[in-house]
Image (cartoon, rainbow, N blue to C red):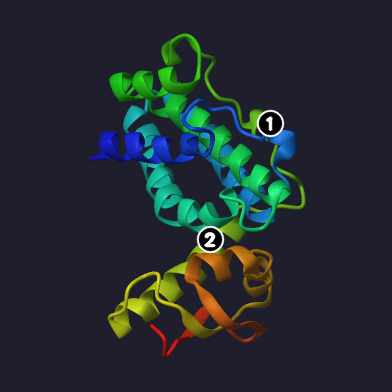
Amino acid sequence: KLAIKILNASKFVLGFAGGDGETGAGGREDVTEPVDLAMLARLADLVTEATEAFEGYDYARALERTEAFFWEFCDQYLELVKGRAYGGRGDEAAWSAQAALQLALSTLLRLFAPFLPFVTEEVWSWWQDGSVHRQPWPQATELGAAASTTPTMLTAVGQVLTGMRGAKSQAKVKMRAPLASVRVSGPVELVGLAERAAEDLRAAGTVVGDLLFVSDPSAEELQVTAQISPDA
């Protein structure tokens, strides 16, 4: 299941350039959107944790943490930036998503390579020269997370996306069904972080009406209230 997901996710990431890895995006310098920077910051933390686990001969820990990040990356981040990566908010925003996706793919393939040698070698051959098993081990510094970006942002945005999906599931409508309005309330910091990804959330959740962010200093967690559009 994991190997198949790696193949499918990789095809998606590379599909923006017809599968050859050449997009309008360049490297880390093209990543400018806050949610993309937050993903790379979280990935940098993973690289550090996986490296320490390998150095301590705790291979199971390295795989467990890498796999946990990968599933969240597929279930939330890919869905969140899909529309923007296809150009929904213009070229610069698209390049940011594409560059972040390719950096993440390169890093994840190298992290998975010791455990899944064949599927990672196959995907690597789609867009890179040589063997993945002869590449340098990833370094957190490659991902260069901005000081102004916190990995917590990805958690906050993911909670909002999950809340919108939950409202649709409860209403028994398709995930692409439009939402008439969405209200996000909760702790000041988390609401502020989620709001920085408002446009991505609007696109991913198909929000056609108001998307409101309300800070509540007394709240301990984010709450998402969504109204299904009559057109759903």
Mark 2 or mark 1, which is nearer to you? 1
Of residues 77 and 41, the one nearer the viewer is 77
Q: Position of residue 20 (x, y in %)?
A: 50, 25
Task: Determine the residue located farthest toward the left in the rendered image.
Answer: 1
89 or 204, which is in the foreground? Answer: 89
Q: Residues within 10 Å of mark 1 (few under 14, many from 20)?
A: some
Q: Secondary structure at mark 1?
A: loop
* Left or right: 184 in relation to 63: right
Using residue 164 as the reference point, say whether residue 150 is left or right of it.
right
Disc 1 residue type (three-letter): Gly
Q: Is residue 96 left or right of residue 178?
A: right
Q: Give percent across and percent down for residue 150.
A: 66, 54
Q: Give the label on residue 65, or none.
A: none
Residue 119 visible somewhere in the drawing: yes
Q: Residue at x 68, y 77 (%)?
A: 188
The one nearer the camera, 180 or 5, is 180
* Residue 221 showing in the rendered view: no
Q: CA distance from mark 2 to mark 1?
A: 26 Å
Mark 2: which amino acid?
Thr
Of mark 2 and mark 1, the one earlier in the sequence is 1
Verify CB contact (< 8 Å) between mark 2 and mark 1. no
The quarter in which the N terminus is drawn is top left
Quarter of the image for residue 2 reads: top left
User: Helix, strand or loop at disc 2?
Assistant: helix
Query: Mark 2 — residue?
Result: 155
User: Local crowd at mark 2 within 10 Å, few (<14), some, or many (≥20)?
Assistant: some
Q: Nearer the viewer, residue 188 or 29?
A: 29
Circle 1 residue: 26
